[in-house]
Amino acid sequence: MSCVPNVFVQRAYLKPMRLQTGGSILAGKLALERGWAINIGGGFHHCSSTKGGGFCPYADITLLIKFLVMYRSVQNVMIVDLDAHQGNGYERDFLGVPEVYIMDMYNKYIYPKDEKAKGAIRRKIELNNRVEDLEYMVKLRQNLKAALKEFKPDILVYNAGTDILDDDPLGHMHISDIGIIKRDEFVFEMCKTHKIPIVMLTSGGYLRKTARIIANSIVNLKNKNLIGNEPRNFAERTPETRE
Ligand SMILES: [Zn+2]
């Protein structure tokens, strides 16, 4: 075992993580005001309000939701977690909270296999190793459409991990580059159709090419007119006018 002085841990690891956590909270606020926001970072979904885990030292998803509930009068939140891993951190925080609807789609054979946290998932899609684009997209389409039929959120938190990519050393799934782009496009499209503000967090992804694919996906969202400069002004929606 080796020890690293705290100053290095803070500078190289914890401080950047704190900035990303602040970014998630800010993105939640902006998404509510403008219709969408993307934090190029965050999505620390293994961290709960009491315990870190799996490279996740701060519970940014729980914090951003609590911020919106406390300071922006948000009532109903949907989390759509498409990272390769189960989002057990925020799931533990929102166990028994009906106002937070969780849809989680993950590889069932990898970390964290947290059975207690699974109790918080309202729509659980457990995938096998090596799942490919076609099966993935069919399941995503069916389940997100069904989720939005049974729950009407004021905001959707999209945990968009890219560790589902082919060759990712931790995700063990076989989704292509274009599969990631189509996945993100579908989630944003659904939010636009249903007039739901969306906040996207980029979460896990452990390949060199990951950053390029995220960038290409965001450009695609822009080209498809799913994000842009025009504020959607969902902030004006009151509880009475929410669909
Ligand atoms: Zn992951």
Image (cartoon, helix red, strand yellow):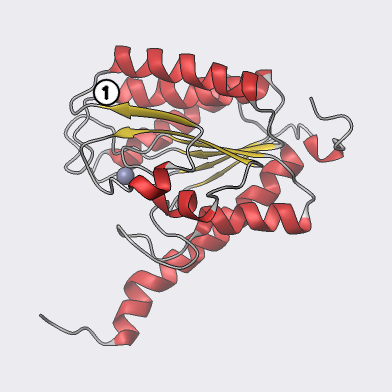
For the question of whether residue 220 can be seen, the reply is no
Disc 1 Cβ-to-ligand 1 distance below 8 Å? no
Residue for point 42% across, 67% down: 16
Q: Amino acid at mark 1?
A: Ser
Q: Please identify the quarter of the rendering in which residue 77 is found.
A: top right
For the question of whether residue 115 can be seen, the reply is yes
User: Which quarter shows the N terminus?
Assistant: bottom left
Q: Nearer the viewer, residue 210 or 133?
A: 133
Residue under numbered circle 1: 176
Q: Where does the image place residue 8, in percent across and percent down from the top left?
A: 30, 81
Where is 94 relative to 160, above or below? below
Q: Please identify the quarter of the rendering in which residue 234 is found.
A: top right
User: Which quarter shows the C terminus?
Assistant: top right
Residue for point 69% across, 47% down: 30
Q: Where does the image place residue 41, in percent across and percent down from the top left?
A: 44, 51
Name the residue furthest left: 1
In the displayed structure, does residue 177 sit left or right of residue 81? left
Q: Nearer the viewer, residue 59 or 202?
A: 59
